[in-house]
């Protein structure tokens, strides 16, 4: 008995019990100012390491694809013969393409005031639930602001703001809840993360029509996140666990682990 | 003592930066190695419970404040890990080198499972607890891959820490 209740066991037990009480009663919130300081110290090192990692990953990808590039090169040489003959028509098509790109506007600058931010680090638990960015209170950011990438694709919302950095809760976070609707049928629902593995559109009425392949955008209900931001495309439709509603599993066109630059919507113009 | 504290803090700081900014880029979600946990594991075995226990608390606090987990989550995880491995290593008189390789992999497996358990308090806000636990531990291939990557990290860290301590003449 004495061996079991050793001082090591007692110390461990006391620490575990103390911090369990801290978690249960939410006493850890008193240390939130420290989070800001630690975030400010980690951010520049994190950003530098993140950029280097992405560049290294890109080099690694290109090294592995050398064999494939060789075959593509041979095919392109053959293709080039045809392209020389079609050059005049291609030039005309290129001009039209550039005009259309300007009209489409890759970034919705005419609708929103945007703040560009670099990603400094990601969720260290590996679930892809949040990212750190290098903009904060001093740059006009506030909690709840929507975060997008080009073409108005929503990636998440600002969750915590510090003077020079912020934490962004991604759509895949289980606590993330967003009012959305489908573009084709107008079916309304709530998008939330599913245990860090994906995003689902939940609480869709049984009477609403939800089609596989349909696009889902924000509905603007609640007034926090603007309307019309792209969320994802419906991959699968299924009944909810209690069979009272429908659920749609969404696929996003962006990979959160490869994010480098994001844009925070500060306000709608 | 000051030198030792400084070195320990710098190593923990670098580990946090690598965990958040480097490993998520190179590894798929769910298979990302737990560098911090392997660091705690290796250090616990090298320094022993008496000399390292209070550092686990400090590093746990720092890890919680650097992330979004509630203060205390990593403290509890690190404390349990330190106690478990130092207890088991005494029981089995294991050594990291030589015949203790299997024991080391057991410790790494324990560390990996505890590292995955850290995600549970953050996920179990609105849904039933068994489903949350199931979603965290339901992918045996991912867990095996995590153990594999963590084992490599553990042996690398176990190789460098004694040399680091020797280089800086830390006890």
Image (cartoon, coloured by chain):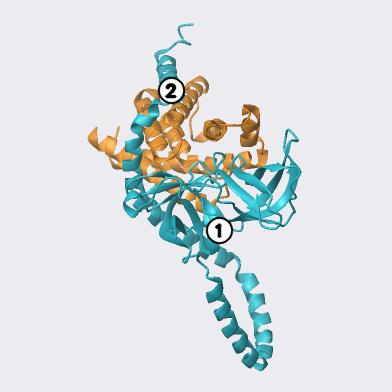
Chain colours: A cyan, B orange
What residue is shown at x 73% (from left), y 49% (from top)?
Answer: A236
Q: The disc numbered 2 marks a residue on which chain?
A: A
The span from disc 2 to disc 1 (Cα, nearest Å) is: 38 Å
* Residue A67 visible: yes
* SS at mark 2 in the image: loop
Drawn side of residue B120 relative to residue A245, left or right: left
Please report whichever mark, 2 or 1, sits nearer to the chain's N-terminal start.
Answer: 2
Residue B99, image x and y in percent?
A: 54, 32
Q: The disc numbered 1 marks a residue on which chain?
A: A
Q: Which quadrant of the rendered structure holds the N terminus of chain B?
A: top left
* Res. A116 image quadrant: bottom left
Query: Dot 2: few (<14), some (14–19), or many (≥20) neighbours within 10 Å?
Result: few
Which one is in front, A3 or A135? A135
What residue is shown at x 43% (from left), y 60% (from top)?
Answer: A114
Drawn side of residue B14 relative to residue B107, left or right: left
Q: Which residue is mark 1?
A: A153
Which one is in front, A118 or A103? A103
* SS at mark 1 in the image: strand
Callouts 2 and 1 in the same chain = yes
Residue B53, image x and y in percent?
A: 38, 25
Could you say which disc has been placed on residue A170 in the image? none
Q: Which residue is mark 2?
A: A25
Drawn side of residue B167 relative to residue A147, left or right: left
Q: Which quadrant of the rendered structure holds the C terminus of chain B?
A: top left
Which one is in front, A116 or A179? A179
Image vertical order of residue A104 relative to residue B1, above or below: below
What residue is shown at x 54% (from left), y 46% (from top)?
Answer: A128
């Amino acid at each position: 008995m004495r061996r079991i209740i050793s001082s090591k066991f007692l110390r461990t037990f006391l620490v575990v019990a103390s911090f369990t009480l801290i978690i249960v009663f939410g006493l850890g919130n008193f240390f939130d100012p420290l989070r800001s300081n630690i975030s400010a110290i980690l951010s520049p090192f994190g950003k530098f390491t993140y950029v280097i990692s992405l560049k290294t990953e890109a080099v690694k990808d290109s090294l592995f694809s050398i064999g494939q590039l060789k075959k593509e090169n041979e095919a392109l040489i053959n293709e080039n013969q045809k392209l020389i003959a079609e050059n005049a028509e291609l030039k005309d098509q290129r001009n039209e393409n550039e005009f259309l790109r300007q009209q489409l506007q890759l970034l919705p600058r005419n609708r929103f005031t945007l703040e560009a931010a670099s990603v400094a680090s990601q969720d260290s638990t590996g679930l892809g639930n949040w990212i750190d960015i290098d903009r904060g209170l001093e740059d006009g950011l506030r909690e709840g602001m929507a975060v997008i990438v080009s073409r108005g694709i929503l990636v998440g919302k600002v969750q915590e703001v510090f003077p020079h950095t912020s934490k962004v809760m991604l759509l895949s976070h289980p606590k993330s809840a967003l009012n959305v609707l489908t573009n084709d049928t107008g079916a309304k629902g709530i998008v939330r993360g599913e245990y860090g593995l994906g995003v689902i559109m939940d609480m869709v009425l049984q009477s609403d029509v939800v089609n596989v392949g349909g696009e889902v955008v924000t509905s603007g209900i609640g007034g926090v996140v603007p309307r019309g931001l792209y969320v994802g495309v419906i991959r699968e439709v299924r009944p909810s666990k209690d069979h009272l509603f429908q659920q749609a599993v969404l696929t996003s066109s962006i990979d959160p682990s490869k994010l480098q630059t994001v844009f925070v919507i500060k306000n709608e113009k | 003592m000051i030198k030792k504290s400084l070195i320990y803090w710098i190593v923990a700081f670098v580990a946090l930066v690598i965990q958040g900014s480097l490993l998520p880029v190179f590894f798929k979600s769910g298979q990302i190695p737990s560098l911090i946990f392997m660091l705690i594991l290796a250090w616990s075995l090298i320094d022993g419970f008496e000399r390292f226990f209070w550092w686990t608390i400090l590093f746990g606090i720092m890890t919680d404040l650097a992330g979004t987990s509630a203060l205390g989550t990593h403290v509890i995880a690190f404390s349990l890990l330190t106690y478990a491995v130092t207890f088991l290593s005494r029981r089995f008189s294991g050594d990291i080198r030589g015949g203790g390789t299997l024991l080391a992999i057991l410790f790494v497996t324990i560390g990996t499972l505890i590292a995955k358990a850290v995600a549970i308090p953050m996920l179990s806000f609105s849904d039933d607890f068994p489903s949350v636990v199931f979603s965290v531990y339901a992918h045996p291939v991912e867990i095996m891959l995590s153990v594999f990557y963590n084992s490599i990290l553990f042996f690398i860290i176990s190789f460098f820490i004694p040399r680091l301590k020797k280089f800086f003449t830390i006890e």
